[in-house]
Structure formats: C-alpha cells, structure tokens
Amino acid sequence: MYRYDQYDQAMVDARVEEFRDQAQRRLEGKLTEDQFKPLRLMNGLYLQLHAYMLRVAVPYGTLSSTQMRALADIAEKYDRGYGHFTTRQNIQYNWIKLEDAADILADLATVEMHAIQTSGNCIRNISSDHFAGAAADEVADPRPYAELLRQWSSFHPEFSYLPRKFKFCVIASETDRAAMRLHDIGIRIVERDGELGAQFYVGGGMGRTPMIAPMIRDFVPLDQLVTYAEACLRVYNRHGRRDNKYKARIKILVHELGAEEYTRQVGEEFAHLLDQGIEPPLAELERIKGYFGDPDLPETGEEIDRSDPDFALWVERNTHPHKVPGHVAAVISLKPVGGIPGDATAEQMRLMADLAERYSHDELRVMHTQNIVLPHVAEADLAAIWKKLAEAGLAAPNLDTVEDIIACPGLDYCSLANARSIPVAQKISERFAATGKTGELGQLKLKISGCINACGHHHAGHIGILGVDRKGVENYQLLLGGSEAEDCSLGKITGPGFDEAGVVDAIETVTDLYLRERTDGERFLDTYRRIGMEPFKEALYG
Amino acid sequence: MIILTGNDLKTGAVVWWTGRAWSLQVDDAVDVGDQADAIARSEEAARHVNVPYAIEAEQTADGVRPAHIKDRVRALGPTVRPDLTLKPADPEAGNWVI
Ligand code: HEM
Ligand code: SF4
C-alpha cells in the first residue's frame, strides 16, 4: 500500500499544527464560530447532533493493521469506544471534544492518516473497488491511479472551492463494486490492444436529483489521465451553479448542457491543457505503482473442510475469488442481526487488525457497504479466521443478503436527518433472521437514508428506504429497482410512505411477492425489472 | 414554552439554558420567553456555548419535552444506544423521545 514520502508527512504534520493553533484560538475566543467553522470542516470536524464528529479519510478504503489499531486507540482514548465505517470508505467518530481534536489529528499523522478534505466543496476521499489488487476479474490494481489523483487533488488550489463537494471513484473491473457511475467522476481502467487507459464517466450522483453518469470518453491514455481530469474539473468550476446549492453538483451541469456539449467543452479545455505540460511524468505513476505490488502468495489447491455448516455458509457467502488460486478475499460483516450497520468497537478493530497482520499481508479494506475486507487470505486459514470472528460477533454470514443493509447515521446522530435509519435496519435484519428467509432471497441489496442527501445510497438499493418528515413524524418511503453496480439504475418510489413498523412489513410483502413470482436464477432485482412496479404496488396498497 | 439549547464549546456536549448556567439535563431548561436572542448572543460571546438556538418545548409532569423529535433525540442521546445516553441504567429513559 502507499506509504507517505517526506513531503506527504511534512504536509500532514504542518496541517496538524496549523489546526492546533486554530482550535486554540477558537477556545480562547479569538475566532468566532463563523470564522472557525470553515477551518474545522477543512479538517473533517463537523458539529453534529450530539457532539463534534470527526470524519477520517481512508484513501480508497485501504488500511494497514497499524492504522486500524490507531483507529481503535482513538475510539478508546477520545471517543466512546467505537467508530462508524461509512459508505465513503471512511470512518467517523461521533463523540469528539474540540479540546482533543488536534491531538487526534496528531495521533492520526503518526500512522500516515488525516482528516483533510473529508468535508467541504473540494475533491473528497477517492473511493475504489474494495477488492482492488485481489480481485480475479480486474485488468489492473486501480489504486495507483486513485493515489495519483489523490496527490494531484489534495491541496489543489484551483479545486479547493468548487461549486460543491466532488467525489471520484476508480475501478478496474467490468463488475462495478464501488458505485462508480454514481460519482461526480467515475473512472474505469480498461485495456485496449494491450494498453491500459481510463474510461471517464462524469455527472453521476445521488442526493436530491439522482443521476447515472454518462460515459464521456472511452479511452484516455494513462499519460493524459490527470490532464483530462483537470479539464473535466475546470469546465465544472467555470460553469457550475454557484447560485443554487441544490443545482451546484456537476451532474446538474452535465444534464443541463447535455453530455455531448459538456464533453465538447472538456475536449477544448483538454487540448489547451495538453500544451501546458501539467501531467506528472509516467515515472511518478510507476513510483506509486511500486507501493502497490502484489503480496507474495504461494498458489495452493488444498480442499478446505466444510463439515461445520455455519463455517461452510460463511465461506460461501462472505468470501470472494482471488486472482491467486487457493486464496480469497474474506469479508468481515459489520452487520450482526439487530446491530448498527458499520459500527465496530475498539476491540473489534484490534481483532480485525490482528487477523490482517497474521493472515492478510497486513491489509484491510473498508467497503462502501460498511463492512471490512481481509483482501489476501489463504483458504487454508479461513477456519481459524472464522473462529476468531465468530467469538467477536463478527461472523454474520450475510454479504449481499437482505441483512447486509447500508444505513446512514440518520436521526440518531445526523443533524440533517428527517428520520432515523438505524432502527429500521435493525428491525429488518431481525425480522428476516427470525423468519429464516434470508438465504432463500439470495442477493438483495437494501439501503436506507435518513434524508434526501442519500448518504445511505437508497436510490441504488434493489430495495431502498428514504426517511422523510411528515408533520414532525418519521415516515419511510419505499423504492424498488435501484442498483449501484454495472447494471446501474435508480429506484422508483412505490407510493405513499409507511411508519417504522409498516415499512418492515412492507419489505416482507415485497419480498414475498418476489418469492412467488421469480423464475429460476432471478435475483429480486431481475424479477422487479421483468414484472415491473405494478404487482408490487398492488401487493402493498391493494 | 421557549427553551434555549446549544453545544458546549469545548466538549460539544448538548446543553440547555437553566436561567443561570448550562445543564446537560433538558429537565433543567427554563422558559426564556422573548429573551432567547439576547441570552444566546451574550452566552455565545462569553464562549459558554456554541451555536445556541431557541426551540419550542412543553413542561410536562415528567419534565421538559422539546416539541421536535430531533431535539428530543439530542436531549437524551442516540435511541439505538441506550448505554450512551444520559440515563444508561434506565430502560424507560427513552420512551418520550420517539
Ligand atoms: C453525519 C453527517 C453527514 C452529513 C452532514 C452529510 C451531508 C451530506 C449532504 C449535504 C449530502 C448531499 C450532497 C449533495 O447532493 O450536494 C450528502 C450526500 C452523501 N453523503 Fe453525506 N453526510 C453525512 C454523513 C455521511 C456518511 C456517514 C457518509 C459516508 C461517508 C456519507 C456519504 C454520502 C454519500 C455517499 C452521499 C451521496 C453523494 C452523491 O452521490 O451525491 N455522508 N451528505
Ligand atoms: S442521508 Fe441525510 S440523514 Fe443520512 S447521514 Fe446523510 S445527511 Fe444525514
């Protein structure tokens, strides 16, 4: 994984001291909240429902064991013993004291981490495939490209004050495990005639006006990657709607101009920029790639003992093929039945760090589905790993099932929320665990947001739930038919919303209809796409 | 009644104006009537509180109850982690929140 060089470390250290001084001045009253707020947000420090909240960047979701342990230490030393892994492959702490914030950033800096640009109208943490470097189906490890873009975008003066927040995603497989087309810029690394290049998708996003990004360039040579990205950003920076927060995202610009006209303007800017020589030399990309070398994994072909049915189920559901035979990427579920999706205690973080150190070449990944991956695991070690996870309540065998729910913090923590998300997720997982239909339902992605901002990706759920405020009472709208994957689509609202108990019943109504209607091998999403919304409406509202 | 809330500047903790100082307990909140703005401004200037704002609430037999669900969640803590609320030992503590 990427290691800081002396410049990275110096920048992050300097930033900590700068923030320490700013926070001190705020505490002494030399800065008003209006003056301080933009400064703390630039360092990931929000003021949330109960306290200050700190969002820590985890570039492309990759963590070392040392870093994961540091996150555990912070949870214990400065927070309430836990952290929340998020849909941006980051971690958030909910109970931070302003007095401690600079010390936390200093602790993070000792393990090459920070919270810079995790908030604000800048280029945010770049997300990627959580199986990057391990997946059998990738043409390359996408992370060096994400890292190159990270280095280019961090502190880029021209892109620190964009019309709105800006999110990149880089993948390198046909299968999209990172919601690539729902990002402001999604990049897929592709291979053409033996050459690698970047396919650009621009103008996707969820939130108030969800859009799927159209492809605007089929193949950008790698020695023009940063230049093309810069051209995309420049056109947006110039024409993005700064007058209206709700229309400020690049998706609105691309939609209003039309993809063709936007692409034309980017092309013009690109031609101009090519003369400016802003592209870092390819040697820099090669240097970065050097940090992402494949771990040395001996090929093995040993059959594993699956006689314990609980273990066998976990292996079946929670592991993913690895490019080296005899290995898998193993998913640690942070979705125990009735639990809070994405929460992990300090002890759980330490256990995950230990397992990664011992069995996964010291690497972990944060998934956008709020789970954790051990990317490079020998199949022969799975039984030992599973046993330790089970003891710690981390072995729920539910990847991509109806119990593997994404839920944003909602009204339990978030000051923008209209309704709670977490209790709805808890009740749904409890219901399906009790009725025992989880396995029968197969792949079913359920995603819940507590407001229209869509941090819980409800638009992209096979089943989505959106919390709304109906005259001061929590109400839940149901959406069907979304997908964040390569078959990307946006869910449609079924009709009037439900109360908390009603929405749990509604999910069961919908899934029961699917079980009656499905034909062989159809996922919930496939059945919905075949039979359409009407039968579901009929079942829900009569 | 109108009560005043905000976050403690140093810790971020949710606090309520008692007429003399700030308390962690919503039940200590007093009616500030039309004084909300003036108190908020002077308390903010004195750095006793951060981003204070006035809300509607009701004095009930059980205590002061903010009108809006968001402020009730703020008053007690997350509804999904009773152990992290102001009354971790009381299983009934949250009954008025939702
Ligand atoms: C808890 C405090 C949070 C606040 C105040 C917040 C704020 C927002 C806002 C205002 C938007 C809408 C942006 C727009 O469309 O212009 C948004 C969208 C989003 N946020 Fe959050 N969010 C929070 C938590 C989270 C969490 C926990 C995550 C995961 C890191 C997250 C990930 C997202 C995602 C994925 C979107 C959709 C972006 C898109 O595709 O347009 N947010 N958030
Ligand atoms: S979707 Fe809304 S409620 Fe949920 S975290 Fe985002 S801003 Fe908060």
Image (cartoon, coloured by chain):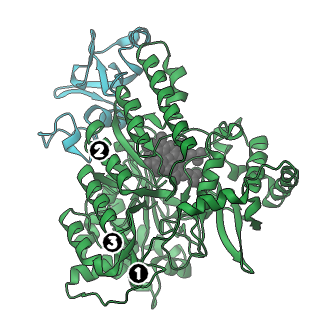
Local SS, label 2 = helix
Local SS, label 3 = loop
Q: Residue at x 51, y 23 (%)?
A: A36
- Kindly identify which chain the residue marked by label 2 belongs to: A
Q: Earlier in the sequence, mark 1 or mark 2?
A: 2
Of badges 2 and 3, nearer the viewer stands 2
Disc 3 crowd, CA 10 A, few/some/many (<14, 14-19, 20+): many
Q: Residue at x 59, y 55 (%)?
A: A147
The amino acid on which the numbered mark 3 sits, given as a three-letter code, is Asn
Q: CA distance from mark 1 to mark 2?
A: 34 Å
Q: Position of residue A79 (x, y in %)?
A: 29, 38
Q: A65 left or right of A188? A: left
The amino acid on which the numbered mark 1 sits, given as a three-letter code, is Pro
Q: Quadrant of residue A448?
A: bottom left
Q: Are marks 1 and 2 in contact (CB under 8 Å)?
A: no
The shade of chain B is cyan
Q: Residue at x 40, y 10 (%)?
A: B34
Q: Is mark 1 within 8 Å of ligand 1?
A: no
Residue with the mark numbered 1: A298
Residue with the mark numbered 2: A73
The amino acid on which the numbered mark 2 sits, given as a three-letter code, is Asp
Residue with the mark numbered 3: A398
The shade of chain A is green
Dividing the image into 4 quarters, which one contains the C terminus of chain A?
Answer: bottom left
Q: Residue at x 72, y 79 (%)?
A: A194
A401 above or below B27? Answer: below
